[in-house]
Image: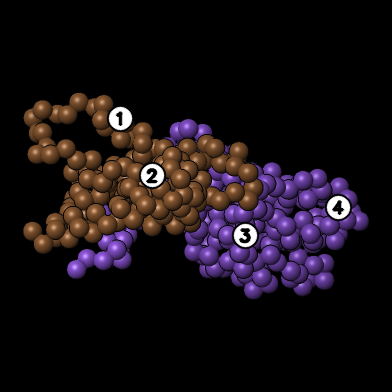
Chain colours: A purple, B brown
């Protein structure tokens, strides 16, 4: 005897194409890309400092989030502040993912990635622009960064600029440490900052 | 989008069969991406997506009825079920044999979880008529599908 429940169960579970698979999603991404409807692409990658969420606009990488941040919440903020046209589209971030892999493997000292800093404004933006010039394996103090960004007194504001850096790792806020030589805080956790500085010192 | 992808796929599979579902699914989400910035905050996203999927499925059925059939392999009987490598063809044939309103009512209420009032709006019926369509659809599925299985 076939019951309604059995019929419905079979409708829900029978046959191919039950869930949108990678192929179907890739097709949607390609179609959206062609139609100019993919404003934010994202993917996640594993790293020695935990899972990272990478997001990019057509202009470049716009957000990198550590595992400690709620990735769904981060995507929600991107939807509000940039565009709700967000899709998981690994292809657009393959290059960034590969460069991050190489960085963590110790074989890359400089990122060659377009960065979209539209989420940072004013002084914070100037701080981030300066951070990009701090080279691999070196550090600067918060007060040095403040002076270099045009406001020597704005040491605390440099701290908040680092804490709200939308693109950590690629914009190396982990290279900013306290004047007394202690490590200072980090968006991805102090342990992660210590690991990154150790990696770069090796 | 991740959240509703599976629901939309279930709906278009039921309306069109597994073979055409992938196309309709992609078209639904492309149209949704296009229109998403105009969606009012707080809207019922699933209901909105199912509405788009419903229209895309109708477009597919219209296009299929206009398309000339290839004369070298005419099907034994007309069916909107595509030539899908499918583990359970009887089910999809039984579904395809239902009147469209019944199929849509079963899909939208039982597979997508829309309330009958919303189902009715989609199929130009009252809430009560939508409820009846879903019940009738399910009841004939139960009969034809069982018969298909037994044969």
Residues at marks 3 and 2, common chain? Answer: no
Between label 3 and label 2, give the one nearer the viewer.
Answer: 2
Asked if residue A121 is positioned above or below residue A142 in the image, the reply reads above
Between label 2 and label 4, give the one nearer the viewer.
Answer: 2
Labels 2 and 1 touching (C-beta < 8 A): no
Q: Chain of mark 1?
A: B
- Which residue matches tag 1? B63
Q: Nearer the viewer, residue A130 or A37?
A: A37
**Mark 2 secondary-structure assignment:** helix
Q: What percent of the width, then of the height, locates residue B55?
A: 41, 37
Q: What percent of the width, then of the height, locates residue B12?
A: 35, 46
Indicate which disc residue B25 carries.
2
The Cα–Cα distance between marks 1 and 3, rounded to whole angstroms, is: 41 Å
Residues at marks 2 and 1, common chain? Answer: yes
- Which residue matches tag 3? A73
- Which residue matches tag 4? A147
Q: What percent of the width, then of the height, locates residue B135?
A: 34, 56
């Amino acid at each position: 005897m076939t019951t309604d429940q059995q019929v419905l169960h079979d409708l829900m579970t029978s046959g191919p194409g039950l869930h949108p698979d990678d192929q179907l999603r890739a097709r949607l991404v390609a179609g959206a890309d062609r139609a100019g409807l993919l404003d934010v692409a994202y993917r996640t990658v594993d790293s020695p400092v935990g899972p990272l969420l990478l997001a990019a606009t057509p202009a470049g990488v716009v957000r990198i989030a550590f595992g400690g941040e709620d990735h769904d919440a981060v995507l929600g903020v991107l939807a509000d502040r940039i565009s709700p046209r967000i899709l998981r589209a690994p292809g657009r971030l393959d290059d960034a993912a590969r460069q991050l892999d190489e960085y963590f493997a110790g074989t890359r000292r400089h990122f060659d990635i377009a960065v979209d800093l539209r989420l940072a404004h004013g002084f914070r933006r100037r701080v981030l622009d300066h951070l990009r010039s701090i080279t691999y394996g070196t550090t600067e103090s918060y007060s040095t960064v403040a002076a270099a960004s045009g406001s020597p007194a704005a040491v605390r504001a440099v701290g908040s600029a680092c804490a709200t850096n939308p693109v950590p790792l690629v914009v190396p806020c982990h290279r900013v440490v306290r004047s007394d030589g202690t490590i200072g805080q980090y968006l991805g956790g102090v342990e992660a900052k210590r690991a990154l500085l150790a990696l770069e010192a090796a | 989008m991740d959240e509703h992808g599976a629901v939309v796929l279930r709906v278009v599979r039921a309306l069109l069969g597994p073979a055409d579902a992938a196309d309709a699914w992609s078209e639904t989400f492309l149209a949704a991406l296009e229109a998403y910035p105009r969606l009012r905050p707080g809207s019922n996203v699933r209901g909105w997506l199912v509405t788009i999927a419903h229209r895309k499925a109708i477009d597919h059925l219209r296009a299929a009825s206009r398309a000339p059939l290839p004369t070298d392999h005419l099907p034994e009987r007309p069916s909107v079920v595509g030539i899908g490598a499918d583990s359970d063809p009887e089910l999809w044939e039984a579904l395809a044999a239902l009147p469209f309103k019944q199929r849509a009512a079963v899909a939208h209420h039982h597979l997508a979880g829309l309330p009958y009032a919303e189902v009715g709006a989609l199929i130009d019926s009252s809430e009560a008529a939508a409820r009846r369509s879903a019940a009738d659809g399910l009841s004939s599925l139960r009969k034809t599908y069982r018969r298909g299985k037994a044969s």
